[in-house]
Image (cartoon, rainbow, N blue to C red):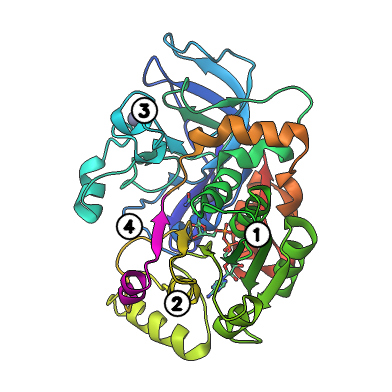
Amino acid sequence: MKANCWEGVKKLRVETVPDPQLLSSHDAIVRVTSTAICGSDLHLYNGFVPSMEKGDVLGHEFMGEVVEVGADVRKLKIGDRVVVPFPIACGVCAMCLDGLFACCENSNPNAWMAAKLWGHSPAGLFGYSHLLGGFAGGQAELVRVPFADIGPIKVPQGLTDEQVLFLSDIFPTGYMGAEMCDIKPGQVVAVWGAGPVGQLAIASARLLGAERVIAIDRFAYRLELAAAKAGATDTINYEDESVFEALKDLTAGRGPDACIDAVGLEAHGPAPVYAYDRAKQALMLETDRPIALREAILACRNGGTVSVIGVYGGFLDKFPMGAIVNRGLTLRSGQCHVQRYSARLLAHIERGDIDPSFVITHWLPLEEAPQAFEMFLHKRDNCEKVVLRT
Ligand code: NAD
Ligand code: ZN
Ligand code: ZN
């Protein structure tokens, strides 16, 4: 089969690799019809995630048709059309039973590696380094899906790939980002990052009742999309004005009730701050650039919530813990527990409350994955989200 393989930092190649095989009686094989590129893939592309190996197949947002099932798979049959959540979860461990699917205790065969870095291991993820299991990803013609009865969501007839594909990751991720804010009617939520994850966090904050949602980014086309399609009531371009001051102006001096970081470890920022974090990162004195996160913490109102769905990998510098403690902030975070949200969000799509496909700007064949990564990384051609077709 053909697959998009990581060959080194900023080096990808679509190669012919062996077809996946069933390794357990609980596995299924899915023939991919649509797969997307995520901001999280950029962290792998740019070399910020350790333990990538030459030839690793990327991709954790995918859907397709079941073509093979193991003997113990009960819920899926050959021919079913499914969307697959990016965290691999067993469904029966203590974490899974508690709905914390992205913290599954059984799905990462390399748990010792992750535990060395983070204390304990989270779930294995598709196409996301050996630290997180070394599972081949979904930017490929075929994928092996472990624990096939737990993750895959059967797609009801009449829904297109575009409408449901993002149930694999960015819709539930944006939704969880908003849900962690415990939004009450009348509240104001600010969202850093108007990438696909930020857009769906904005849309979800509106679904959950936020009165005002403020989008923050530096790309005008992304801020325009946030206002036109996601439901942002205000936008701030951080290259044109001080985010902190603008947020004070918009909230009578108090700050937003909740702040969502949908940027993560590769944040940009005003020149001196960016130069500081970029230099420390290059010298390996910090692993991540927490520019948006620091700003979100400082801007949040007293007693408010900072919800972090942007991905961080390691250690941060100048982290304003004093603001968190002294102003009674709540910090919440996580890789998305996708399986927890599948039914609820599919129902929203079926009812027409939301159509997450509004983020798609480019459709390309899988063969063009390397060019698509380049375009998405540099936000060329007003790229918001790329879907690859096999
Ligand atoms: P993206 O690269 O398209 O979007 C990131 C956006 O952040 C860009 O538009 C960029 O201009 C903006 N940005 C950079 N610095 C900023 C700053 N200082 N202030 C405001 N905006 C800034 O990526 P995406 O696909 O939207 O993903 C966003 C993040 O979400 C990534 O870190 C990704 O790894 C993470 N993610 C997390 C989960 C999860 O489960 N928690 C799931 C999917 C993606
Ligand atoms: Zn993703
Ligand atoms: Zn589990």
Q: Residues within 10 Å of mark 2 (few under 14, many from 20)?
A: many
Dot 3 or dot 1, earlier in sequence: 3
- Residue under label 4, please give it: 50
Q: Position of residue 33 (x, y in %)?
A: 66, 33
Q: Rounded to the nearest whole Å, what is the CA distance between mark 2 and mark 4? A: 30 Å
* Quadrant containing ligand 1: bottom right
Q: Which residue is mark 2?
A: 298
Q: Are marks 2 and 1 in contact (CB under 8 Å)?
A: no
Q: Determine which of the numbered discs, if any, sits on residue 197 in the image.
A: none
Identify the residue at image location x=47%, y=69%.
266
Label 4: few (<14), some (14–19) or many (≥20) C-alpha neighbours in 10 Å: few
Discs 3/4, front: 3
Circle number at residue 97: 3
Indicate which disc residue 186 carries: 1
Residue depth check, mark 2 versus mark 1: number of the one nearer the observer: 1
Q: CA distance from mark 2 to mark 3?
A: 35 Å
User: What residue do we see at 69% from left, 69% from top?
Assistant: 380
Q: Is residue 196 left or right of residue 19?
A: right
* Amino acid type, callout 2: Leu
The verdict on label 2 being within 8 Å of ligand 1 is no
* Contact (Cβ within 8 Å) of mark 2 with mark 3: no
Q: CA distance from mark 3 to mark 1?
A: 34 Å
Task: Classify 104 as above or below 386.
Answer: above
Q: Which mark sits nearer the N-terminus, 2 or 1?
A: 1
Q: Position of residue 3 (x, y in %)?
A: 54, 41
Looking at the image, residue 153 lies above or below residue 258: above
The Cα–Cα distance between marks 2 and 1, rounded to whole angstroms, is 21 Å
Local packing at callout 3 (Cα closer than 10 Å; few below 14, some 14-19, many 20+) is few
Task: Check disc 1 and give the amino acid type.
Answer: Gly
Label 3 sits on what residue type? Leu
Residue at the bottom extreme, as displayed: 272
Q: Callout 4, which amino acid?
A: Pro
